[in-house]
Amino acid sequence: MDDELYDEFGNYVGPELTDSDEEAGETEPFQDGVAEVEDGGGGDELDEGMVDESEDAAVAMGNAIVLPEEKQYYPDVEEVFGEDTEALVEEEDAQPVSEPILSRAKVKRMDVKMSDAPMGPRFSWKYLEKGLLTEPALTRNVAVCGHLHHGKTALIDWIVEDTHDVRWSADREVKFSDTRLDEQKRGISIKATPLTVLLQTLEGKSYGFNLIDTPGHPNFLDEVVASMRLCDGVIIVIDALEGVMVGTEKILRRAVSEQLDIVIVISKVDRLILEVKIPPTDAYFKIKHTIHEINEIIGSTSPDAPRMSPELGNVCFASARHGWLFSLEQFASIYIAKNSKVNFTSGDLSKRLWGEWFFDAARHIFVTSRPKPEEHIDPPERSFVEFILEPLYKLYSVTMGNEPDVLLAKLESLRIADHFEQEDLKLDVRPLLKLVLSSFFGHSSGGLASMLVGKVATPTIGGGRKASQYYMGPSDSREVKAMRECDPQGPLVVLITKLLPDQTCDTFLALGRVMSGAAAQGDQVRVLGDTYDPENEVEDQANAVIESLFLPCARYRYAVEKVYAGQLVLFQGVDSTIGKGATLVAADEDSKHLHIFRPMISTLRCGVTSAVVRVAVEPLRPSELPRMVEGLRMCNKTYPGLQYRVEDSGEHVLMGPGELFMDCVLHDLRSVFAEIEIKVSDPCVPFFETVSEISSLKCFAESPNKKNKLTFVAEPLEEGLADRLEEGIAHSLHKQSGSGLSRIGLNRILRDEFGWDALAVRNLWAIGPDPVVGPNCLIDDVLPGWSATDRDLLEKNRVSIVQGFQWATREGPLCDEPVRGLKCRILEAIIADTSSVRNIGQLIPTARRVTLSAFLTASPRLMEPTYYAEIMTPADKMSVIYTLLSRRRGHVLEDVPKPASPMFIVKALLPVLDSFGFETDLRTFTQGQAFCVQIFDHWSVVPGDPLDKTVVLRPLEPAPNNALARECMVKTRRRKGMSEDIFIGRYFDDPILLQLARRDTPGLG
């Protein structure tokens, strides 16, 4: 081809072609095996035979007629790839149009990018790892807890900013410990995040602090409980304006029951100054009222717990938004440093800066009574108001006054003007406030560090508490002694309470506390699950290798080679067999006898939170069921409060504390772990079955071989006893009682609080369905000499009867839901002498059958969960809230004004069954002015009789109030694939059925 005939774009620019030339140009380039030969130029070099054949082929092809459909515009596959290539032609595109032909590889990402983290700490990680964390006396493990939006994450941001070479803009909240992408979008914390930092006290001494930032929403109290199990103390952050809320009360009570040291941070003090603009004296009384509420809650939980008060050094004040935090001792140090005439030490002065202390300027002394008015023109205010709040108010006022000269003069009087340049005084208000106040207080976390060091126990003291509370083995064993001493040379024991997904979301990092011994990278360990029993070593235990160890710091982590007793560490490589929690021990012969720590699920049931919202899930495409099951397994690992089970009908059921919790779980299932589309059922609630009266007759059941006979009577438990049993007071009835309440303590509670007689207390056999925290009792009430019962045979077969009772309370007769609040008394037990006819196959079904028959004759009822709702609202929206609650079977307990605030707090009870969508309605009808949090409170009886067959249920019509129990029972049975009505012949023998017929039909017999 001559290059002069074409331009640089391949367009023909040569002389005009004739028709014959055009036809030749169309056909010649697409003919197979045709060599292009030009006249002159290179023709002599070709083989003579080849030239002749080419010319003949060209002449023959030039004379042929080629149809358009037969033209070959592109080379064949054989020409490109060879004759051995097989070509498959698809006439229909199997790829959807919405899917690109080439798409980017999907990368699972749950966390914020690691590059967003400040990688320049002001402390040395080597010094922290090798020098501080190896010494328990120089380490503190603390959880940061509080109600929703009270400033916990902002406090962590302030600590991170103080310990790292980074300065964040004052115009936005960084939320450094909110590492998940959905946390950043929602604006709330969802998961607990660990953070290890080095802080210096006011004296300049360095300590290592393992902090855990916890969520504040009541739906995520399971994360708070998991964090508290690892820590020795807790920082409770409380909004100065909102004060004590329902989440604060729950956390305070939990911390006291866990024997944790408590430190209070009164945060967002700037709201009192800038938002509600109350005078300094009123601000003092507001803060004092909040501290008084805290002490009332602590005192009602445990009279022996220490009192919270600023002068005791366990309360400090903060505004993380404006970059300051101080304790009274720190503020006293500032006064002493700036005024050489003060003849007090910081400790002595701090004790006079709170309470009924006044400064007598005439005599230059502090007095406990206000000086008389005639002695002073203006009577002095309390010392906290005069020396702290009024200067703080003035500093805020001058900074916001938009007068640089006045502000500069004030800064010079405070001796901090050297920290500012002229351009700094022209900043916007919020950055300027942060700059001025952080300069005045030194932007140092020394006050907080000093308070934690002085008030929070060391890992040595805290480890002894953990061993006494949670370890289920003998209290005098070698490992318990090592845990109490926090001995790095003792046997390795690690308490695991949380699993955190890694960046790929395919594996997990296990967050745990080394209780004793030391762990190194590459060590072989045994992973003991929550159901591990030393008597059966095969079950729920596996061997693993510690692949890596990390010290966490929210968005990044620091790798270490070895960790020692008292540290909080992330373990990599041990997660494959862990469900929610575990115990790690060394993989040697000496660890074969070790026990586990009590599972956290028993703690969650102790009035903290309950899984009361239920949904069923299934994949949109049935072929993706294995992926969904694997995703559900991973969700179950990372959410401590999530319950997952497969029903007999085959549906996959998820249960959690609330709507927000379930929304986060389903988001992770769809977008992170399974990455499939799923179908979700409408939310519903689990039920409990209970009785309201004593059995109308003595119920008996015979074994299948008619050789054994048991007689029971059922009645309701005393009010409040079921709640106490769920708190674990009956641990001593179970063989793995561990360090729970002794049998003597249990007997005292039953006798003194619930009025049981000595015979009933002594003959309490078991509780069920859970042998440790079950809310039902089984009592041996057989009187000697009054029946044909052989006491020795009854005692020998006790285990079988207990198993039958626990089976019956696990699956009630109304709708296969658990039983609650049932007390079963054994009146008579006729058991065969021959062991072959009184085996477990005969006694367990008989005990179950007689328990259910006694239950059905004691006026059975259904129980539903009830929320405690706390609604913050303006006064003009109160009527709207009352109307919304009345539509959903809710009722108001009280409505009280919030001190120093224009808001009211409405406290109400709302059935969980009618609570779905309540928060959305509340925001809609109040134009977003009301805010609500809901937390599980108690179980209440559903109105109506579930066995009343006279109730007619019409489709698409709400059932009347007295028919609600019947409707709930019928719909639950339908959902589970059961018949609508109960067939009583399954539970009653023929003589009992005849007695029931005579009772229900007057005149019969």
Image: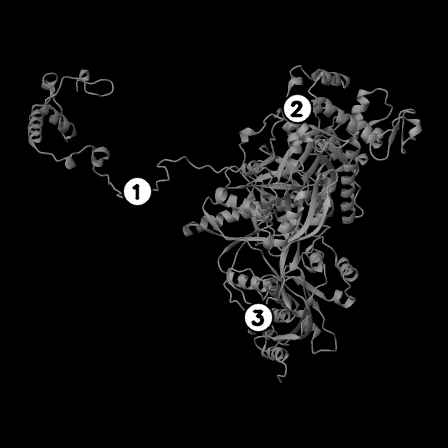
Question: The N terminus is located in which quarter?
Answer: top left
**Is residue 106 shown left or right of residue 988?**
left
Q: Is residue 130 visible?
A: no
The one of 110 and 207 positioned closer to us in this rendering: 110
Q: Give the CA separation, mark 3 to mark 2.
A: 71 Å
What's the amino acid at mark 3? Thr
Classify mark 3: helix, strand or loop.
loop
Going from N to C along the chain, the mark reached first, 1 or 2, is 1
| Residue beneath disc 3 | 950
The answer to which image quadrant residue 802 occupies is bottom right
Can residue 723 be seen here? yes
Along the polypeptide, which appears first: circle 3 or circle 2? Answer: 2
Q: At 63% from the left edge and 62% from the top edge, which residue is drawn?
A: 943
The residue under label 1 is which amino acid type?
A: Asp
CA distance separating discs 1 and 3: 60 Å
| Closest to the observer, 208 or 57 | 57
The residue pinned by badge 1 equals 93
Name the residue carrying label 2.
429
Q: CA distance from mark 1 to mark 2?
A: 62 Å
Instruction: Write down the quadrant of residue 293 in the picture.
Output: top right
Q: Is residue 116 above or below residue 414?
A: below
Along the viewing direction, whichever of 636 and 240 lies nearer the viewer: 240
Q: Provide residue 503's location: percent of width, then percent of height.
A: 52, 37
Q: Secondary structure at mark 2?
A: helix
- Which colour scheme appears in the figure? one colour
